[in-house]
Image (spheres, rainbow, N blue to C red):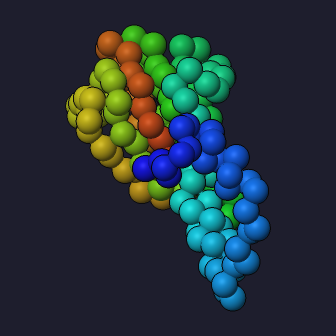
Amino acid sequence: MMSEGLQTWSDQALLALCLDPEPFRTGVKGKLMARIAAEAEHRPAVCIRAAQGDWVASEVPGVAIKPLYHDPAHGLSTVLVRMDPGIIYPAHKHHDAEQCLVLEGDLRWEGLEYRAGDFVVARAGSIHPRLTTEHGALLLIVAGQNEFLPA
């Protein structure tokens, strides 16, 4: 609400600049700075928008990988994997567990079929059989750094 005699918000702002600043009460600045620091902890450390980042060709033609995040403290990487229709990905051994969420398309191995929304985990030390996709696939993978060792 504007004071009587002041016609605009800019008039009030100018008046405020003319006033002597009120000193902070003891501890207020410290509390404010702590609150600002706490807010910063909740901001994302990494944000990659859908149109950002680069797709990198893998050793298998028709399969591309888009790195999203690597956590060196835990040895985990998060990547998107895009597989063209008809791709056959060779069998391989997992050193660490691999988490896979099918985002689009289909993924098959040994008579099992996974579609969008399906989640599967390959255990550490397991042999991943040959993977195929009929229509192509987009996968979100969270895995250890020593994945895709030859079976």
- Residue positioned 58% across, 34% down in the render: 48
Residue 31 seen in the figure: yes
Give x and y (percent) for residue 112: 23, 34
Give x and y (percent) for residue 142: 50, 47
Residue 93 seen in the figure: no
In this view, the residue farthest toward the front is 5
Relative to 113, residue 85 above or below = above
68 displayed left or right of 142: right
58 displayed left or right of 50: right
18 displayed left or right of 114: right
Give x and y (percent) for residue 26: 69, 88
Relative to 21, residue 62 above or below = above
- Residue positioned 64% across, 80% down in the render: 28
The foreground one among 28 and 2 is 2
- Residue positioned 51% across, 25% down in the render: 50
The quadrant in which the C terminus is found is top right
Relative to 74, residue 130 above or below = above
The foreground one among 62 and 129 is 62
The picture quadrant where one finds residue 60 is: top right
- Residue positioned 55% across, 37% down in the render: 8
The picture quadrant where one finds residue 88 is: top left
The foreground one among 150 and 74 is 74
